[in-house]
Image (tube, rainbow, N blue to C red):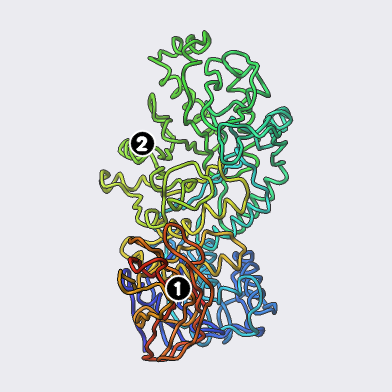
Amino acid sequence: MKSYIRCGLLVAMLTMPLAGFSLESDDSLSIIPQPFNAELNDGTFTINSKTIIVRPKQSMDVAKVLSSTLETAIGSPLKTKSGALNSKNTISLEIDKELASKYGNEAYSLEVTPAHIQIRGASSAGIFYGMQTLRQLLPPASLKSAVSEEISIPCLKILDYPRFAWRGMMVDSCRHFMPIEGLKRFIDAMALHKFNNLHWHLTEDQGWRIEIKKYPKLTEIGSIRAESPVKGNRRKGDGKPYGPYFYTQEQIRELVAYAKERFITIVPEIEMPGHSIAALTAYPNLGCTGGPYKLRTRWGVEPDIYCAGNDEVFEFLENVMTEVMDLFPSQFIHIGGDEAPKGRWKSCPRCQARIKKEGLHNEHELQSYFISRMDKFLSSHGRRLIGWDEILEGGLAPGATVMSWRGEKGGIKAAQSNHDVVMSPNSHMYFDKYQARQGEPEAIGGFLPLEKVYGYNPIPKALNDSQQKHVLGVQANLWSEYIHTPKHLEYMAYPRACALATVAWTPLAAKPTYENFLKQLRVDLERLDALGINYRKLPVKSQEVGSWKSGETGQTFKQMEWDITTNVKTAGKYILTFSYTSGTHRLDIEWAELLENGKVVARDEHRGTTGSTNKGNTYSLTLPKTIKNAKYQLRASVLSDGGNDSNGIINLKFLGK
C-alpha cells in the first residue's frame, strides 16, 4: 500500500503515528521545516552496525558527518565506501544534476525502502539537507546518545527544496559577547533546521569584537567598555569593566570552517558610518571632531560617526575589509548603514567640503556616497555589499542589497528598483522582543509570540511577479542588549526559530496549519533537548472543567465532584487550580483527588485557600494509565470560610508524562 500526500495535505501524514518509528513509544513523525512533497509507504528500514554508507567522491565530507550522526544514534561506527548503490542494508548518497536544473542547488530527494536509504542531492548541500531530514526521522534522544543497537526508519519518499535562498539568523556579539563554543551549539541547531546564513554582528558603539592585525588598538582599546547597564535598570551602570572581549582571527577561521561543514555561511557585519564609537575611541582621527571618544556604556545611538570627508576613514575601512574578506569567504559583506545621525556631518568642514566637491545636495546623499564608495571597493574584490534599509537614503548604491528592518517599506522600495532584498522586519523578525506579556526575562520591549512569527509571509503583496524574485529570503535578528549569554540567546531564538525555518523553507502550499505545526514542534523540542539547546518551553493551556457557586458550599468541609471525562485524554501529570471569582467568602480546600470509573487513582492532600489571596490552591494529580471509555471525575473537600457566598472556577492543565 502507498499513500500519496502532496503540499498542504502532507501535514496529515507528518502527524500520524507510524509503527516502528520509535523504539520506546509510538511517536509522531515530525519534520521541521516541512518538506514540499512526500509519499509514505509500508515497512521500515533498520539501521544497525552492518549498515554501509555509500558515497560519491565529491561528497566525502557529508558522508563523514552522516557516519558520525548514526554512530551517535546506535553506538557503533558505520563503514563508508565510494561507489554506486548495489546491495542491501546501505545508505547511498548521490549527486543528481537533474535536481539542480529543476529545483536549484539545495534540492534533495530521500527514499527509504526495506532494503536501503537513498539520498540524492542537487549538490553536496542538497545531500546535507536530506541528511537533516533523516536525522529528524530518528528518535529525538538519539541526537545525543545511543538509544539502541538498531533503529527503524519508516519507508517513504520525499522531494524537497527551499522556498528562499537566504534563510538566516543574526547574532549580535557586541553588546554582550558570545563565546565560540556557544556559537557552535547555535550553529548546530540552525543546521538541523536547514538555515544557511549566520549574520554575525561584530562592531558597535559598545565594543569591537574582531581582531584586525593592521589596527591592534581596535581590540586593545575598543573591546573594553567601562561598565554596562544594570540588569533590570537600563539607566544605571553596574560599575564593572566589560572586556576585553573579542575573537582572534584564528577563532574566526575555526568558526567559519565549522559553519561551512554544516553548509552555513557566516556573513560578517562591520558597521559604518554609524555605530562606530568603539573604532573612534581607538583611532580618534577617524571622527569629525577628533575626540576624545569613549565606548558607550548604555544602549542606544551615538551622535559621533565616521567622518565622510576624511580620506583616512576610507583607507582605514578598506584595510579592515581586506582582512575581513580574508577571514570570511561569504559572497555578502554587511556594512550596517543604520542609525547614522547626520549632526556631526552638518557642522564638519571636511564633510561639507566633500558634499560640495561631489555635487551632493545634503548629508543623506553624503551617506549614499559613503556606501557607494565601499560598494565599489567590495565589488572590485568579487563581493557584494548588503546593509540595513537606511542605505536607501540619498540613493542606493548600484550593487547594494537591502536588509529591510523598519517594516517592509524599505524592502518594497528596493525590490521595485530592481535591488535584491532580505526581509527582516522588526514587526515579525526581531527575536529580542518578549515571547509573552508577563513572566519573561528582561527584553528590549515589544511582544513577538511564536504564532506571529509562523504567520509571516516574506513576499509583500505590493510586489509584482518580477519584483518578487528580488526577495532573496528572510532573517531573524537577535540583538544582545538584553541577551547576556549563549543560553539566553538560545532561549530567545527557540522555538521561534523553528517557526522561521518553516517560513523560510516550506512553500506556502505545503505549509501546515499552526495547530499542526505545534504538534510537530513538540517532537522537535525533544531534539533541541538532546542538543542541549535552552529553548523556551511551550505554554501549557488550561481548561475550565468546573465551578462552584453561592449556596453550594458551607462553613464545614463537604465533598464536591465534577465530571472531566472529556478533558482527560492521556496518562500523565495534571494540575488542578481553584480560582475565586466573586462573593464575600473565600474557599478553603482540604484535598483533591482524581477518580477513574469511581475509583481513586490520584490524590493530593494539603490545605489550600483562594479568595483575596491564593495560597496552595493548586493540586497535582498523576494518572498512571488510561482505560478505554473510562469516566473521570474530580472530587474535592471544600468549605467557604465565614458563610456560603462564594463563587469560582476550576482549571485543569496537562503537563505531560
Give yes or no for contact between labels 1 and 2 (Cβ–Cβ under 8 Å): no
Q: Nearer the viewer, mark 1 or mark 2?
A: 1
Which of the two labelled residues, at mark 1 and mark 2, occupies the earlier sequence position? 2
Query: What's the residue type where badge 1 is placed?
Result: Phe
Indicate which disc residue 142 carries.
none
Residue at 52% from the left image edge and 8% from the top image edge? 349
544 is higher (above) or lower (below) than 176:
below
Find residue 500 and report its horizontal and vertical position in percent.
43, 56
User: In the rendered image, which quarter is residue 392 located in?
Assistant: top left
**Dot 1 alpha-carbon crowd within 10 angstroms: few under 14, some 14 to 19, many 20 or more:** many
Which residue type carries mark 2?
Gly
Q: Which residue is depicted at the point 40% across and 76% down? A: 15
Q: Residue at x 44, y 82 (%)?
A: 570
User: Camera-side residue: 509 or 564?
Assistant: 564
Q: Residue 19's x, y, as percent? A: 47, 87
User: Which quarter of the image is occupied by the N terminus?
Assistant: bottom left
Helix, strand or loop for disc 2: helix
* Dot label at residue 654: 1
The answer to whether 617 appears left or right of 456 in the picture is right
Q: Is residue 204 above or below residue 624?
A: above
Residue 142 image-quadrant placement: bottom right
217 horizontally vs 305: left or right? right
Q: Give the residue at mark 2.
A: 410
SS for callout 1: strand
Closest to the observer, 562 or 189: 562
User: x, y (%) of residue 77?
Assistant: 70, 77
